[in-house]
Structures are given as C-alpha cells and as structure tokens.
Amino acid sequence: MTTQAPIQETSAVPQHPPGGNNWRTYFSFSTDHKVIGIQYLVTTFIFYLIGGALATAVRTELATPEVDFVSREVYNSLFTVHATVMIFLWIVPAGTGAFGNYLIPLMIGARDMAFPKLNAIAFWMIPPAGVLLLLSFIWGAPAAGWTSYPPLSIVTNRIGEVIWILSVLILGTSSILGAVNFLTTLIKMRMPGMGFNQMPLFCWAMLAASALILLSTPVLAGALILLSFDILAGTAFFNPTGGGDPVVYQHMFWFYSHPAVYIMILPVFGMISEILPVHARKPIFGYKAIAYSSLAISFLGLIVWAHHMFTSGTPAWLRMFFMIATMVIAVPTGIKVFSWLATIWGGKISLNSAMLFAMGFVSMFVIGGISGVMVAAVPFDIHVHDTYFIVAHLHYVLFGGSVFGLYAGIYHWFPKMTGRMMNETLGRAHFILTLVGFNLAFMPMHKLGLEGMNRRIAEYDPKFAALNLVCTIGSYILAVSTLPFIVNAAWSWMSGPKAGDNPWRALTLEWQTSSPPPVENFEGEPVLITDPYGYGMNNGQTLTEVEPAPVS
C-alpha cells in the first residue's frame, strides 16, 4: 500500500439523479445490483423478525421448567424453523446477497454485476423458499432440528421435513448463483489499474466466501436429495434399519454447515475492515494480512467439519486431526482481530452507531471465538456436547458476530443507499438495548451448559430455572431492541437529514459517486485512489490533525 492521494472534496463530485427508483422498483424484477441489494436487505430483515419471534416463543417456553406455553411437538418445530430462518434466510443472504450485491460493483468501479439477470433470479428464489418454509406449520412443520439428522428426520413430520428440504435446496441454489456472479465480477470486472492488492478488504472477504459457497453447498444439496429419497421412496442411504449409515449424512451435512459459519462471518469481517478505519481516522493495520487471512479461513474452513462429530464414533486419530485443524483456524481469525485493534488504537474514534456496533462485534465475536477454541478440544467438547454451552457459543459467533456486524454495515452504508442520515440517538438506544439484551440472553447459557443442561428440550431440571428466567428476560430485551432500529430506518429513509455524497469522508470508490448512486453507478470513469485506507496521511498531516467524520 502506498501513500494516500489527496481526499477529493464532496463538492467536486457531480450530483447525479438516483436513477429514477421509486418504491415500485423494489417490487420488480430489476437487474440493477443496487436495487437487488436493497431487496435482499429488506426481505432478509423481515425474515429476521420472523425468526426472532420464533426464538422469543422458544424462550417463553423455557422461562419455566414445565411445558406450559406450547406442546413439546410445537416446541421442536419452533426451534427447528427458527434456526433455519436465521441461517438460510437472514445471515447468509444478508451478508453475501445484500451487501455483496450493493457494494462490490461500486467498490471495484464496475457498472453492474457480471450477470445481472442471474442476479435477479438468485434474489427472487428467496421469498418463495421462505414462505414455503413458514407455510409448513399448516401441514406439520419440520421438527428434527436444523440439522435434520436421520433417522429422526425420516420418521418425524415427513411432510414438514420434505418442505424443509425443498426450501433449503432452493435457498442453496440461490446462494450458488450469487457466488458465481460475485467471483466473476471480482475477477473480471475490476476497473483498470485495480489489482487484487488494491481491492477493498470487503471484496477480499466476498472472494473467499464465494469460493466456500461453490465448494461446499453442492455437498449439502446432495445429502438433502438422498435424504428426501429415504423419506419419500423408502431408500436406505441414511436409514440404519435398511443398512444405511446416518453418520455419512453427518459428514455431508457438516462439510457444508461448518464452512457455512465462515460464509456467514467472512462478509461481516470485510465490512468491519471497512468501517473501523473510517471512523477511527487511521489507516487499516496489516492490509495484506487481513486480505490473505480471508483466503486462509476459506481453505481451512473446508477441513474442520468433523469437530461437530466428536461424539459420533469418529476414530481417535481422526478426532486429533480435526481438533488441531480447528485450533489452527483461530490463527487467521486472530490476525484479523489484532489488526482491527491496532487500527483503532490511538485513533480519533467517532462513536457513532456504526462504530459502536463494529466494536461491539469485535468484543462479542472474541467471546465466541474463545469458546470455539474450547470446544475444539476433544475432552471438553465431549463434556459439553449437546448442552447449552454450544448454544451460547453459536450465538456469540453468529449473533454477537454476524448480526452486530450487519447492523454496523447498515448504519455505515445507509447514507449511500438512501441519501439520508440515520438518527444517532435512536441508533445508540438500539445498540445499548441489543448489547444488554444479547448478553443477558446468552452469557448465562455458558454456565447452564457446564452444569449439564441439554439443549433442544422443552422441560428441564428445576435447578436451572433461575438462569433460564434471566435468559428469557434478556431475549425480551433483545426483541424490543429492534423497535428503535425499525423506527429509525423507516423515518430516516423517508425524511432523515440529507447525507451528501460522502458524509464519513471515506476513501473507497463507492463514496466517489452520489448518494444514492445513479443507475450505472458513476458519471464518467471513477478515480482510483492510491491507498483507500490512507486516513490520517493526507498531505503529510499527522493523525491528530485530522478531525473525525461528523456525527448527525
């Protein structure tokens, strides 16, 4: 990375019309990557609210040891559909589909994605797949957990399981189509002069995540098709009563589903790498280390899947391999965390909503990462397997990680998407409620798991009642935390203060065009800035001479 070129004044950037988009555009089969990105974001957020409502129902049942809110069968369906919605209809499509679609062409100076029609098709597969999954409650929702392990999934709510399989297959196909588009766009459509080492770090993260999608998702599709044959045609690929092996299904399922963790988190890693230097007014620390660690995570993510199967009869020598590989993958993740901390250390930090959620992401994700290294150790994993310790670890990685990061991304790029600023008072209230509610809901689960409370059951030993009540209260606070955000986003989009083209005085290419951008993104050719992370380096100024970006 070389010395920063002078920051362009906002007034020097031509003011463009936003492309004539109105509310009807977002309900159309648009091929504009920006429209598709917002379609992804709004649609997946609606599914996030639905998944959150299902989670609140689950926690309401768990507020007391007895089964007194919903039946055991309904409880099983609630947590199954909750997990499926949150993973396949919220985090994966929001991180890759929403932000990937909106930002990648803008960040690399392209006019659109490589395959615009394919891009639109990938999005329009998501709403029917999600509606289909939710309609399964009419005929008997899936109740075998989001893993759908046989033989349980073969004999439980067969109609619901088949609907679940069909929905996930459609969503997986959408994900594959998106990954093909992202990879082609990033490799072939960068503006002249932009080599790989000049790409924004979000683009590196999307490159790694897209490769993972293409390599792992077809394996899950194969497993689900074979499972559907077992359910519908009476075959015995995974049914032990007919000579099948359910452990083979576990290998095929986790070969996708552990890389799916990185498919969910890598785009968020990229967003955090964009947000922190802007609001700390410091150059990113270790650009190449962050960029190449994304590729390392993508590679290592493919060889750690069986750490989910330490209790499934895996041979001792194989358990050792997967234990070591799982611990090794903490190294490139740790490189990112230390680089982020070095970036904000000594910076002129602007504690706006985007920065608060970004720093909240780092702290919450580190907690999830520490517990992840713990469960990578075979003896400890055997002790806490299928307990609430795993539930806590999962949510600190995926909610404390992905969701905090997605919120940070929304607050950061909302002015670019809409031309309006969000309200900082509501944003800070949203952050505080989310942070308090999240930690109340999930921190006590570590202790519950260590004491032996099993997950996926509706009733439990009364000795766990007090901590479960705390978790339920935390889940209610977490549910309420979405209200200031919804009000903030709706009000700001309609009548928030005008943002200007570059309210954060950021240096990456998406901030060189108008807010919102015109149909073809740029008027003329965008200017490639020598160092898109050269904050505090302008015209020989020292760091302390550069004022932070304003907060509305």
Image: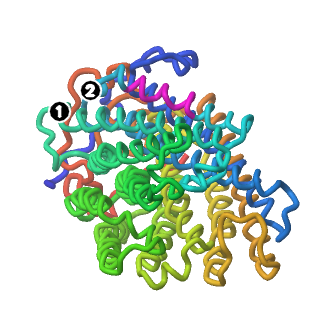
Q: CA distance from mark 2 to mark 1?
A: 8 Å
Could you classify mark 2 by the number of other residues whose Cα lies within 10 Å: few (under 14), some (14-19), or many (20 or more)?
many
Q: Which residue is mark 2?
A: 114
Residue at x 74% of width, y 35% of height: 138
Residue at x 72% of width, y 35% of height: 139
Amino acid of disc 1: Lys
Question: Which mark identifies residue 188?
Answer: 1
Amino acid of disc 2: Ala
Q: Quadrant of residue 188?
A: top left
Q: Quadrant of residue 85?
A: top right
Q: Could you tell me which secondary element the residue under label 2 belongs to?
A: loop
Residue lying furthest right in this view? 68
Residue 462 seen in render: yes
Q: Magenta residues?
A: 119-129
* Camera-nearest residue between 392 and 162: 162
Q: Could you tell me which secondary element the residue under label 1 belongs to?
A: helix
- Left or right of 404 in this view: 268: left
Q: Is residue 423 above or below residue 441?
A: above
Residue 467 belongs to the span the image colors magenta: no
